[in-house]
């Protein structure tokens, strides 16, 4: 039976079933993949990995045979990110680099080849500095349990911040802020905007999970997160909207409107044939 793909490793704190990974620029780390068969760690015979940029241009590739893909433990394999360090950040655009990591594996010749795609976002410290502030505001469920840590992953936080900056930019007048150059004095505005994105995500989750309702001996119990989240979402939208007006006023230019009355052809003929100095409509003078 072919090895079953179990998941990716995000950080030492989180599992990463969605295949989205964030890491700090300049930090070497292992990019891992997990396999199991019948819930037991399993090692495929053939494993290949290809790293591409966001334009799908191949940067580096290799396999288990040439030691590009390394084994860490039973069912756990990885590639080292150190080879990506020269490519990991766009200094010209001052933007995070995104890599596509394509894994393929099989049990040897004649067996089916399977694949999985992982996204790697390499972020700067400027972006990472927003993570604790955003987590402090939205992640009140973050705690250590017997099943591991419960809470948002760094990839979640990054996408919420990116969604927040998108919402800020499209508010008129349109701007082109990034997480790198957003004004620090308006840092809380970015956190609040990212919170709105996270509340939308939580609201969709509550639609699926708010299904428990029962009554017994005169007592009733209903799980209703959605209505409370919607109330908080409406409040945050109003609050962020007011702050956005203040921010965008700094990027608005004072403009004026000039009205000019242009005489038509017949009236222009009258002006030209009238005595010099004649005044018409208190606006036009001949000659």
Image (tube, helix red, strand yellow):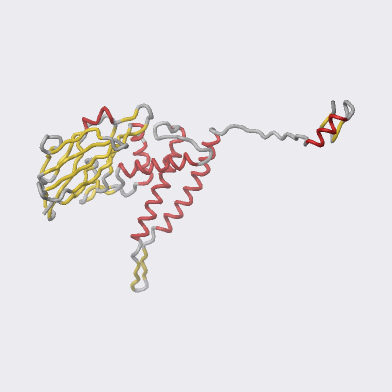
Counting from the top left corner in percent of width and height, residue 198 is at 38, 48
Image height of 45 relative to 88, above or below: below
Residue 80, image x, y percentages: 19, 34
Residue that sits furthest to the bottom in the current view: 217
Compared to 216, does 42 lie above or below? Answer: above
Q: Nearer the viewer, residue 114 or 119?
A: 114
**Residue 119 figure quarter:** top left
**Image check: 162 left or right of 33?**
right
In the image: residue 56, left or right of residue 287:
left
Q: Nearer the viewer, residue 70 or 27?
A: 70
Q: Indicate the position of residue 112 as horizontal and vertical percent values.
A: 15, 51
196 up-or-down from 251: above or below: below
Q: Quadrant of the N terminus?
A: bottom left
Which residue appears at 40% of the width and 58% of the height?
226
Looking at the image, the residue that sits furthest to the right is 275
At x 48% / y 41%, what residue is drawn? Answer: 170
Based on the displayed image, in which of its 4 quarters is residue 253 positioned? top right
Instruction: Give the image location of residue 162, x and y in percent.
Output: 39, 40
Image quarter hosting the C terminus = top right
Q: Looking at the image, which residue is at 21% across and 34% down?
A: 29
Q: Residue at x 36, y 70 (%)?
A: 219
In front of the other: 84 or 152: 84
């Amino acid at each position: 039976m072919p090895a079953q793909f179990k998941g990716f490793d995000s950080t030492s704190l989180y599992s990463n079933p969605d295949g989205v990974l964030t890491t700090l620029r300049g930090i070497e780390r292992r990019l891992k993949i997990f396999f199991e068969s019948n819930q037991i760690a399993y090692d495929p015979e053939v494993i290949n990995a290809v790293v591409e940029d966001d334009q799908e241009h191949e940067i580096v590739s290799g396999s288990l045979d040439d030691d590009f893909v390394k084994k860490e433990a039973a069912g756990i394999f990885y590639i080292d990110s150190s080879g990506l360090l020269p490519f990991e950040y766009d200094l010209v655009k001052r933007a995070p680099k995104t890599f596509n990591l394509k894994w393929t594996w099989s049990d040897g010749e004649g067996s089916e080849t399977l694949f999985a795609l992982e996204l790697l976002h390499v972020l700067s410290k400027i972006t990472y500095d927003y993570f604790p502030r955003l987590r402090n505001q939205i992640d009140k469920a973050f705690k250590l349990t017997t099943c591991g840590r419960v809470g948002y992953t760094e990839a979640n936080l990054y996408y919420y911040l990116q969604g927040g900056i998108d919402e800020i930019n499209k508010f008129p007048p349109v701007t082109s802020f990034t997480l790198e150059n957003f004004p620090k004095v308006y840092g809380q505005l970015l956190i609040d905007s990212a919170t709105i994105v996270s509340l939308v995500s939580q609201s969709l989750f509550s639609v699926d999970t708010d299904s428990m309702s029962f009554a017994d001996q005169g007592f009733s119990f209903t799980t209703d997160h959605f209505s409370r989240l919607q109330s908080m979402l409406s409040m945050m939208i109003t609050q962020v909207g007011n702050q956005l007006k203040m921010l965008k006023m700094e990027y608005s230019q004072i403009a004026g409107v000039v009205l000019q009355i242009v005489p038509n052809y017949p009236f222009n003929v009258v002006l030209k044939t009238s005595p010099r100095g004649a005044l018409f409509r208190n606006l036009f003078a001949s000659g």
